[in-house]
Amino acid sequence: METTERPDNTLKIPADINYQCTGCGKCCSGWSVPMTEEDYQRINAVNWADLNPDLKNKNLFRTLKANEKIGTPYAYAINPEPNGQCPFLKDNLCFMHSKFGAQFKPSICQLFPYCFNETPDGVYTTVSFISRGAIFNSGQSLIEQKEYLQSKYKEFQKLYPDHHPNWSQIKLSSNWPLTWEQYMDIEKTILSIMQNKNKSLEERFIEGSAYLKSRLSNADLSSLTNGSVSALNKWDKILLVALYRKYFPPQNKSAKSYGQLHLNLSSFMTAIPYINNIEQLVRETDNIAWSIDADSNDLLYRFFYSRLFAKLYFGAGFGQLSIITGFNHLAVLLAIIKLKVKALAMTHKDRKISQSDIVQTIVQLEKSLGELRISPYGAAILELLLSSQQRVGRFLCQM
Ligand code: SF4
């Protein structure tokens, strides 16, 4: 099916996801807000220094470098303050918004945190987990906000008229093409596995990964769910280093750049010297108990459910990965989140996991995933390393 046009504008809205702005101002920190050419012309025409003395003598904007623009509609960015905060955030309120209204802000800020993924059978919506409103499931469910979502989607279409995701290459694995209808059939089972709250998230991922593998070979599902619990092998560690270093860059580095996160051949080559460090981290965090409260568990579930529902894990939704690779990548992300949260717990006196560590980790990961560009070589290596259901089992059992 030719899917480069917008064939169906029906909004598909997930259950279980709520959102309301909590007014905390935290979404306006930790990144270099990108702007389209039109945003820049509108915003740069204002003499901000005259309107607010805090904005005097500041280099507020910059041109994006060529490699930051690739695959984006953006051309400029707002320079964050040294503390990572947007210079227009004043007393937890957007100064542009207070002065000139919501529609004056950069396009990305107007739409935030709503995400729209156009597919052959409708526009799948969700919210970004950078937002504390989404993290804490504040306010009304997205289903109850349908009218508002429709107005936001109209804005999205106006702001990004050239955004046409290409879903014509859907694959179960690298050489197993699927039609959209076949995918939707598989997705029904995947979502029902992931919604089974009687099992841990780890068990649900292992079951989902085994189910996808069984669709490839009609293999007996029960034989695949006996996941190996052997130690991580060398390729597991290379994958772990490459993804961990990519998704959790130093805060000051990620705040100053936009679109600089590239997963390519060199991400894996440069991972090799860090294997010892990651082995040490896995060892040191091994005795930190993964004991989390019900709210944190629910947050992790919603984070993954949201990406699955909105199809932000495979095909045009994420690096043109196959469904098996995209799903197994999410499973490995759960292991990486646990490793990062345990690493943060090691810095506490009591070495206990706190909800704020989980929140910080999810926010950072969501930012990184949103900015990540996967090169064809990067995608090919992920296809190779993430086709293994046993590898997923090792990650989820070892961390
Ligand atoms: S422009 Fe306004 S809404 Fe956008 S990041 Fe800055 S303060 Fe926040």
Image: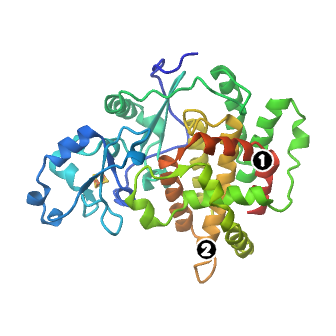
Which residue is located at x 14 percent, y 64 percent?
A: 56
Residue 294 appearing in the image: no
| Residue assigned mark 2 | 345
**Most extreme residue toward the left, as rendered?**
50
Q: From mark 2 to mark 1, how far is it between C-alphas?
A: 26 Å
Residue at 32% x, 69% y: name it: 82
Image quadrant occupied by the C terminus: bottom right
Q: Quadrant of residue 6?
A: top left
For the N terminus, which image quadrant?
top right
Name the side, left or right, on which 237 lies relative to 248: right
Q: Which residue is mark 1?
A: 206
Residue placed most toward the observer, 41 or 27: 41
The residue sitting at 69% across, 55% down in the picture is: 239
x 78%, y 51%: residue:
391
Q: Are marks 2 and 1 in contact (CB under 8 Å)?
A: no
The three-letter code of the residue at mark 1 reads Ile
